[in-house]
């Protein structure tokens, strides 16, 4: 299959080849952060590829960024450790002040600063973001933050976080999503001064945490854009996130198919390779076809995004189709491996767990379906 951006893909594969299965298995077992891997990607400039050249990045499009993420996953690595470093800065780039951009973006480009944590999800609000309870109350030239977030990933490996908090009650605005604001919180100053981070052990190694805000005081200069418009700013960043995560799913799926093909060719049962059986071949072939189709939707969404047009429908469909294809490919790969699929040393069970995340985060499959039903097909709003 012809793939776009082959030079970028080759360069990413070269870095990833230094981080084989044993590396990821150990990190996964101990739930340790893959700092060496993230540093290597940063130094190679891959994580700043979306930052414009005037701020020290390489100013590439989402299409190139998607190629980076896909190759990381296809090599068996886990880009979930650092994918947000690529796209979280987009909120500041689009809506931040020039001072915020100058303070942050060159540092991200050079690898001195990390902005790879965003706090949106809360324990009680779930997918209904309008019901978040974390508040930011303005007091002269500061904001006082109180509340709690959950599943805030990579915050312990980040210098700044983007925080969504209520600056006005839910019923004060015209719509439930009004009255929320985005803040750029300096974690280095906040931790221990009102910000507490508690690691959350999970099914996958994702450096995820619970975060508590108890009278955290931050300067008014932390506000990104205008007060009250925060939800729209977060929404603006979601298409990029969906496209990049869809690309990761394509990479996972490619890894599963390749692994299954190799095993089906090697493993002999009843005196012949198991791959001679159509019962083994067909699920592999089906996964391959499904991945190719999903990859086309990722390309289409990327092209529309890079042209500056609205790609909401395509980005959502790309994420849906790619996450479904990778999850099915993971199941197929496990089945092809029989009992050995459960053995740590094959990495199949690890990748199987990791790719499962994308049915739920950053947005669950049901919510994408309801987006398509309502916004693309014109069906009534269902919630
Ligand atoms: C490993 C991990 C890392 C994460 N990292 C981050 C992060 O860095 N920052 C962050 O802010 N969040 C993060 N999240 C949170 C993630 O975005 C949410 O888990 C996800 O959006 C789903 O929200 P929820 O868990 O509250 O599910 P809920 O909203 O409680 O939903 C539960 C189930 O009900 C379904 N459901 C809910 N409402 C409807 C409806 N109206 N119609 C049909 N089905 C519905 C959902 O699809 C889901 O399957 C992370 C989550 C995980 C697991």
Image (cartoon, rainbow, N blue to C red):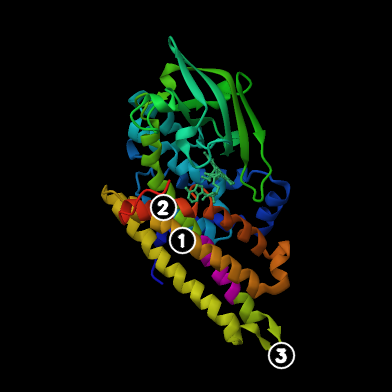
Q: Residues within 10 Å of mark 2 (few under 14, many from 20)?
A: some
Which of these two is toward me, 202 or 62? Answer: 202
Judge whether residue 112 is colored magenta: no
Dot placed on the residue nearer the N-terminal end, 3 or 2: 3
> Which dot, 1 or 3, sits closer to the camera?
1
Q: Which residues are magenta?
A: 250-261
User: How dense is the environment of label 3, judged by Cα within 10 Å: few (below 14), some, or many (20 and up)?
Assistant: few
Q: Residue furthest top?
A: 140
**In this rendering, is residue 236 above or below 73?**
above
Q: Is residue 310 left or right of residue 58?
A: left
Residue 88's spot in the image, x, y percent? 45, 39
Taking the image as drawn, is residue 4 in sight? no
Q: Which residue was labeled with disc 1? A: 322
Residue at disc 1, secondary structure: helix
Q: Is residue 68 visible?
A: yes
Residue indicated by mark 3: 271
- Numbered disc in front, either 3 or 2: 2
Residue 51 sits in quarter: top left
For marks 1 and 3, give the CA distance: 36 Å
């Amino acid at each position: 299959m012809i793939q776009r951006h082959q030079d970028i893909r080759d360069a990413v594969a070269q870095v990833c080849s230094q981080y084989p299965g044993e590396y990821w298995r150990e990190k996964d077992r101990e739930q340790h952060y893959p700092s060496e891997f993230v540093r290597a990607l940063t130094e190679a400039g891959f994580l700043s590829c979306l930052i414009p050249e005037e701020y020290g990045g390489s100013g590439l499009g989402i299409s190139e960024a998607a190629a980076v993420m896909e190759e990381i996953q296809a090599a068996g690595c886990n880009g979930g450790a650092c994918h947000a470093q690529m796209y979280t800065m987009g909120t500041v780039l689009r809506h931040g002040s020039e001072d915020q951009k100058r303070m942050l973006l060159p540092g991200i480009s050079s690898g001195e600063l990390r902005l790879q944590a965003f706090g949106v999800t809360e324990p009680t609000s779930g997918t209904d973001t309008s019901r978040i309870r974390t508040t930011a109350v303005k007091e002269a030239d500061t904001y006082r933050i109180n509340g709690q977030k959950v599943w805030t990933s990579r915050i312990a490996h980040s210098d700044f976080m983007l925080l969504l908090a209520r600056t006005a009650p839910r019923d004060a605005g015209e719509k439930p999503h009004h009255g929320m604001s985005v803040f750029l919180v300096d974690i280095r100053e906040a931790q221990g001064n009102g910000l507490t981070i508690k690691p959350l052990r999970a099914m996958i190694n994702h450096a995820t945490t619970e975060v508590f805000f108890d009278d955290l005081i931050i300067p008014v200069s932390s506000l990104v854009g205008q007060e009250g418009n925060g939800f729209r700013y977060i929404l603006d960043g979601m298409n990029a996130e969906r496209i990049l995560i869809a690309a990761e799913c394509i990479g996972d799926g490619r890894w599963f198919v390749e692994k299954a093909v190799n095993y089906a060719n090697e493993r002999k049962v009843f005196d012949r390779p198991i791959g001679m059986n159509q019962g083994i071949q067909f699920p592999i072939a089906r996964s391959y076809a499904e991945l190719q189709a999903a990859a086309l939707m990722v390309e289409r969404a990327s092209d529309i995004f890079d042209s500056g047009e609205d790609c909401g429908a395509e980005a959502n469909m790309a994420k849906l189709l790619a996450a479904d294809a990778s999850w099915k490919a993971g199941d197929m790969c496990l089945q092809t491996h029989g009992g050995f699929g459960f053995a740590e040393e094959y990495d199949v069970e690890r990748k199987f767990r990791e790719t499962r995340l994308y049915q739920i985060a950053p947005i669950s499959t049901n919510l994408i379906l309801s987006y398509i039903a309502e916004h693309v097909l014109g069906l009534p709003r269902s919630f």
